[in-house]
């Protein structure tokens, strides 16, 4: 376990301190690329099936990658770290190891530490109402307005049930998704619409289970998703799995509900993740102050994305301020802050995210090992872990949308980089949980190596932001105290039972 000491954090703040089940597939006929063997492009592609197109490099593909290079059939059509590492050891010249996803594409000798842990580089163009800013609030937006993030490669299984696509929902259709991947990840050219349609048709027939296939058939037949019963209700479960299903329904189904296990069915829970923000990026609380403080909620009735807290978890990992072991904790991630404006003129700012600290950062490096405390500091408020949680003149804590006293940067702005909406900051799409046992590592940044680690992270850090999801029972204390003063959300037995049920999905 890492020890989240002040000295440990100091080593990783850097320049900030100086400023303030197997996949069920219908008629696939595809085996994925074989190590060391890159299929040759085919001159006449008119008769090729969608599966064949999926497995072949595209004409003009600068790095000879195919769709199957990153969506590996043997690994539930995802890119697993195990596959990437094994391929690296067997054949580092495989097209997967393209310079575009090197740790430093301009280096004389290319290394692929991120890719070997299942992460690819994704370039995003900032919306016209956003700027990149530095720690002091100065605008530093690149001339081309592009930033990059490191992200996992999701499975294509059940894609017929989970539009829109990409972790930030920036692509509306499977055909558009195929073209975007060919351009950005294969360094290829525009592909004829009929080829994209065949690829999309193939992808739409890849399912995690017959349960998902049955849901897709009903959708194709015109049955609305809301009228399709959840097929898992018919599973024959062990006693442990049945208890796990009860935990799932109490905790997970609020956002992983519906017949696709990816639909928000409890808007009250969802809306708890959307506190109203001031221009400084801090949460607006009810006045007079309540005990505990009550955030004012932003109205996001049509927002199907959510900031569950995995991006700030990566921030904590980067500054060595959490005891949770991160699978990608030895990697470096970009460090960003952003300013959001009212419109594309970029004249009226509406939020800086993450917000500037409410206290001088050097306070963290003075005093005793437990760190400083200010008004409302220590274990009161939402500071946790000895971090100060300064209160405003009304007695409410000063903290950002993650309800955390200190977030110097984000490693990924999430959907906000697509919409320009500050309430999408660090928000991501909600994936289906079918087949979840087969697609480790997890989250948009691969910070959890195992499904057990996912459940631990949920219980210790993420669910505490949603009080109705904290279940009854004797819990172990919060191991590192860096989210709030409460203990874990789930008991050890509840976690074990939930794990058993998730493995059945």
Image (spheres, rainbow, N blue to C red):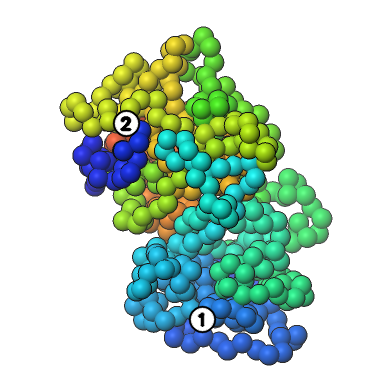
Crowding at mark 2 (Cα within 10 Å: few <14, some 14-19, many 20+): some
Q: Is residue 371 left or right of residue 313?
A: left
Compared with 241, 371 (above or below) is: above
Please indicate whether residue 202 sits to the left or right of residue 353 in the image. Answer: right
Residue 57 drawn at (x, y percent):
59, 81
**Between 301 and 386, the one nearer to me in the picture:** 386
Residue 64 percent coordinates (x, y): 54, 80
Residue that carries the numbered disc 2 in the rendered image: 361
Q: Is residue 448 left or right of residue 439?
A: left
Residue 134 on image: x %, y %? 44, 41
Residue at the disc numbered 1: 33
> What element does badge 1 sit on?
loop
Q: Give the farthest residue toward the left.
A: 368
Question: How many labels were placed on the picture?
Answer: 2
Question: Compared with residue 275, is residue 207 higher up or lower down, i.e. above or below?
Answer: below
Q: Residue at x 53, y 47 (%)?
A: 141
- Using the rendered image of the protein, determine whether residue 187 is visible from the camera's viewpoint: yes
Q: Position of residue 51 (x, y in %)?
A: 65, 78
């Amino acid at each position: 376990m890492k020890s989240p000491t002040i000295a440990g954090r100091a080593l990783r703040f850097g320049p900030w301190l100086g400023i303030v089940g197997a996949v069920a597939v219908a008629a696939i006929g595809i085996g994925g690329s074989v190590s060391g063997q890159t299929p040759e492009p085919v001159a006449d592609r008119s008769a090729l099936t969608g599966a064949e197109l999926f497995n072949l490099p595209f004409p003009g593909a600068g790095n000879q990658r195919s769709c199957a290079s990153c969506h590996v059939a043997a690994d539930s059509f995802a890119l697993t770290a195990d596959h990437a590492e094994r391929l690296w050891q067997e054949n580092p010249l495989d097209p997967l190891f393209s310079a575009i996803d090197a740790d430093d594409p301009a280096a004389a000798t290319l290394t692929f530490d991120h890719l070997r842990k299942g992460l690819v580089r994704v370039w995003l163009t900032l919306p016209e109402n956003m700027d990149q800013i530095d720690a002091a609030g100065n605008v530093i937006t690149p001339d081309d307005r592009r930033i990059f993030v490191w992200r996992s490669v999701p499975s294509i299984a059940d894609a017929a049930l989970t539009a829109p696509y990409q972790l930030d929902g920036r692509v509306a259709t499977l055909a558009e998704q195929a073209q975007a991947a060919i351009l950005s990840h294969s360094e290829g050219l525009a592909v004829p619409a009929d080829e994209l349609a065949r690829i999309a048709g193939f992808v739409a027939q890849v399912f995690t289970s017959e349960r998902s296939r049955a849901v897709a058939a009903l959708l194709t037949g015109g049955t609305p998703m809301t009228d399709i019963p959840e097929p898992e209700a018919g599973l024959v479960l062990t006693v442990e799995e049945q208890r796990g299903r009860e935990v799932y329904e109490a905790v997970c189904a609020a956002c992983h509900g519906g017949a696709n296990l990816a639909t928000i069915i409890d808007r009250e829970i969802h809306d708890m993740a959307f506190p109203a923000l001031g221009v400084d990026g801090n949460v607006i609380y009810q006045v007079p102050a309540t005990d505990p403080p009550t955030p004012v909620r932003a109205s996001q009735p049509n927002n199907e994305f959510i900031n569950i807290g995995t991006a700030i978890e990566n921030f904590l990992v980067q500054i060595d301020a959490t005891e949770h072991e991160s699978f990608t904790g030895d990697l470096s991630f970009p460090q960003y802050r952003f300013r959001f404006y009212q419109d594309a003129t970029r004249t009226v700012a509406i939020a800086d995210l993450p917000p500037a600290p409410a206290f001088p950062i050097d306070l963290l490096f003075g005093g005793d090992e437990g760190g400083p405390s200010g008004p409302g500091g220590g274990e009161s408020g939402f500071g946790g872990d000895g971090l100060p949680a300064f209160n405003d003149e009304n007695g409410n804590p000063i903290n950002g949308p993650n309800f955390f006293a200190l977030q110097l940067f984000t490693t990924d702005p999430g959907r906000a980089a697509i919409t320009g909406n500050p309430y999408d900051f660090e928000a991501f799409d909600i994936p289906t949980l079918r087949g979840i046992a087969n697609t480790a590592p997890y989250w948009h940044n691969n910070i959890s190596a195992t499904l057990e680690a996912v459940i631990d992270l949920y219980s210790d850090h993420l669910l505490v932001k949603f009080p109705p999801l904290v279940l009854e029972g004797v819990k172990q204390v919060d191991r590192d105290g860096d989210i709030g003063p409460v203990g874990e959300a789930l008991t050890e037995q509840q976690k074990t039972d939930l794990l058993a049920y998730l493995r059945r999905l």
